Image: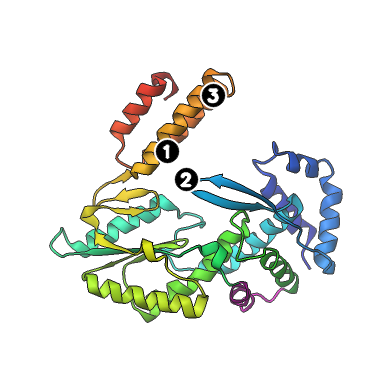
Amino acid sequence: MISQTELLKAYQKFVKGKNKKIDVQQFMLNFEEELVILWRDVNSGSYRHGKYEHFRVFDPKLREIDKASVRDRIVHQLVYDYLVKIFDRTFYFYSFAARKGKGTHQAIKVFRKMFLHANRNFRNPVFVLKCDIEKFFASIDRKILFLLIARKIKNEQYIFLIKQIVESFYRGIPLGNLTSQIFANIYLNELDRFVKHHLKIKRYIRYMDDFVILGKDRNELLGITEKINHFLKIELKVNLHPRKIIIRKLVQGVDFLGYVVFPYHSILRTKTRKRLLRRIEARQKDCQLGKVSFTKFAQTINSYFGILKHCSSFKLRRKILSLVGEEVS
């Protein structure tokens, strides 16, 4: 049985930082009664996942987002916390997405360290294979996903809830669900195992469905690509994006996780840089028109500086300050 304490903890984690959202406020008005009803439904087997609210965002490309109800998102938090405890310790160490103590900046640091170790002060040629999976979240096979989860889970209540979440969407898994992060890592942990244990690749890093492999020979990396794509098609029913299979030397710069990575430094992608400047100009206009406060505007600028501190960005920071003035920094 799932305890009321477990559900309450999930609720408290879910609402943190969301108490200004209208749907969350409405739930909070009568949260004790709502949680009791939810607890009964979860344990009696009468819980049914509701419908999603669909919307689109540009970040920077068009993304289809589907948002579940507050009630369902509390269940997502409950299931997410349960699965992380069981699965996270089984994941490949250099899988960096949606995991505590990991993230994009750690992934880039490790990527660079792996390259320098393999390159031995530029005496050995090193090539980088970069790939991602085409329409990954929409392409996930839900039957395979559920089987991968169910083989490690014994708790019947959680099995029931996981099945409700997995089957709640019409295709793949939705980008908006918290559970989709852990589901994706469980799914692609099979790829990690194949790469490390079957192909015996030493230098491999994955961030969600983006991954890089370091090797000494371009043809060898092409052969590895074919083996990986075959495995993905047969075992996981997904495909590498054919236009995003790239092999090049790191000294030429490799586009990875929003940055162009070089052996000793990183820079922002050109598209990201232009988009950032456009957003700052738009936010500045909103501030001048009184649509946002100066404090909010300054917070936006400082958050961008937080991103830029992880790459070589002196000229870009100077340009931002020339646009908005020194007082916001």
From what the image shows, is residue 1 above or below residue 306?
below
From what the image shows, is residue 95 above or below residue 232?
above
Image quadrant occupied by the N terminus: bottom right
Amino acid beneath label 2: Pro
Residue 138 is situated, as x and y percent measured from the top left of the image, at: 56, 63
- Is mark 3 in CB contact (under 8 Å) with mark 1? no
The secondary element bearing badge 3 is classed as: helix
Residue 151 lies in the magenta-colored region: yes
- Is mark 1 in CB contact (under 8 Å) with mark 2? yes
Residue bearing the label numbered 2: 60
Image quadrant occupied by the C terminus: top left
Residue bearing the label numbered 3: 286
* Quarter of the image where one finds residue 82: bottom right
Q: Which residues are magenta?
A: 142-155
Residue 304 lies in the magenta-colored region: no
Amino acid beneath label 3: Asp
The secondary element bearing badge 2 is classed as: loop
